[in-house]
Amino acid sequence: MKNIAIYPGSFDPITYGHLDIIKRAVKIFDKVIVAVAHNSEKDPLFDVSERVALLKKATRNIKGVEVDDFHGLVVDYVKGKKARVVIRGLRMISDFEFEFQMALTNRKLSEDVETIFMMPSESYSYLSSKLIKEAAGLGADLKGFVPGFVEKAIKSKLR
């Protein structure tokens, strides 16, 4: 039986911080499914199919990664994929309270699903997709934050 983990998120857009967690997660799990959430409460820059395409391109050379999207509860998606683990990234202390609440809620919804928190390398610990979009809107060079093709996609959306 494969040891599968799900890394859910909005990934709007994918950053080097996300990629750092993905690369380290595939060292622990046989398969990591990066799952883009359909979330009607957020106003994303990219639609789900665009985020999936960017993720597939960004992870194409990382063995053991699958990219998908999902609707509904993450615990239902996890069980549907025959997985038991959710990976969540923690950048700063400020992320902890929200992530802790979400992990406890998921545990209450399904005791079979565990949440593992992973911290990105310190060089990416401050990155957020929101910050990247704000910086891009102000004309910043994004090469240290996202892959070049993601920067081009962001800038073309913001024109």
Image (tube, grey):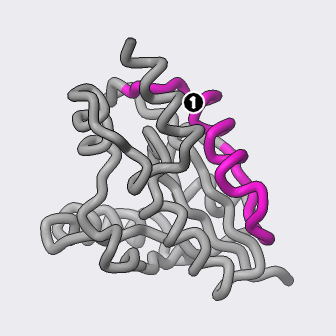
Frontmost residue, 82 versus 67 = 67
Frontmost residue, 18 versus 78 = 18
Residue 85 against residue 37 in the figure, above or below: below
The residue under the point 77% across, 55% down is: 60
Q: Quadrant of the N terminus?
A: bottom right
Residue 55 against residue 102 in the figure, above or below: above
Residue picked out by circle 1:
48
Point out residue 51 in the picture as x, y percentages from the top left corner.
57, 36
The residue under the point 39% across, 53% down is: 145
The residue under the point 27% across, 29% down is: 139
Residue 148 against residue 65 in the figure, above or below: above
Frontmost residue, 108 versus 118 = 118
Q: Is residue 123 left or right of residue 47?
A: left
Residue 143 against residue 26 in the figure, above or below: above
The residue under the point 47% across, 37% down is: 151
Residue at the right extreme, as displayed: 1
Instruction: Kindly indicate the quadrant of the structure image that contains residue 48.
Output: top right
Magenta range is 44-68
Point out residue 116 in the picture as x, y percentages from the top left corner.
45, 80
Q: Is 27 within the magenta? A: no
Q: Quadrant of the C terminus?
A: top left
What's the residue type where badge 1 is placed? Val
Residue at the top extreme, as displayed: 159
Frontmost residue, 35 versus 101 = 35
